[in-house]
Image: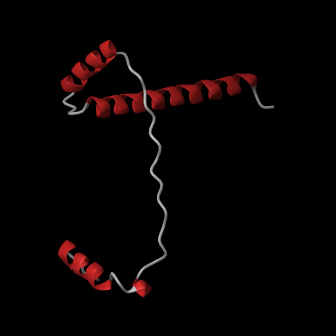
Amino acid sequence: MRRRHSEDEIDKIVVAQAHDDSTWEEPIRVRRSKTASLSIPAELIKRASFLAKLHREKETRDWLTRIIRERVELEETAFAEAKRELQEKEGPP
């Protein structure tokens, strides 16, 4: 069984091979995912900030992201369930 290298060992290997192109794979391109901006009323931000602190979240943005993600997942699940029920009522085509 091969032992795992420490971070220092990995760093030394990478530095030693840095100028040897034969040790590297083809480069890959990574694109940053696009983020969206939302304009949220100040009063709503105040309320959200309070709730984020209540839930011990350091950043209101992180709390809002989590809450929005959870809500979207709930809505998607509800939609899929409603669609399935509708298809069952209609019967096979």
Give the camera-side residue of 20 and 1: 20
Image-quadrant location for residue 88: top right
Q: Position of residue 58 (x, y in %)?
A: 20, 33
Give the camera-side residue of 77 and 16: 16
For the N terminus, the image quarter is bottom left
Q: Position of residue 27 (x, y in %)?
A: 47, 71
Image-quadrant location for residue 92: top right
Establish if 60 lies above or below 42: below
Q: Is residue 4 in view from this perspective? A: no
Identified at 47% across, 59% down, the residue is 30
Give the camera-side residue of 57 and 2: 57
In this image, 69 relative to 16: left or right?
right
Q: How many discs appear?
A: 0
Q: What's the image's color scheme?
A: secondary structure
In this image, 32 relative to 59: left or right?
right
Identified at 27% across, 80% down, the residue is 15
Outermost front residue = 19
Outermost top residue = 43
For the C terminus, the image quarter is top right
Q: Position of residue 12 (x, y in %)?
A: 22, 80
Give the camera-side residue of 80 and 47: 47
Q: Is residue 12 in view from this perspective? A: yes
In this image, 32 relative to 46: left or right?
right
Image-quadrant location for residue 80: top right
Establish if 55 lies above or below 41: below
In this image, 5 relative to 24: left or right?
left
Identified at 47% across, 43% down, the residue is 34
Q: Position of residue 55 (x, y in %)?
A: 22, 27
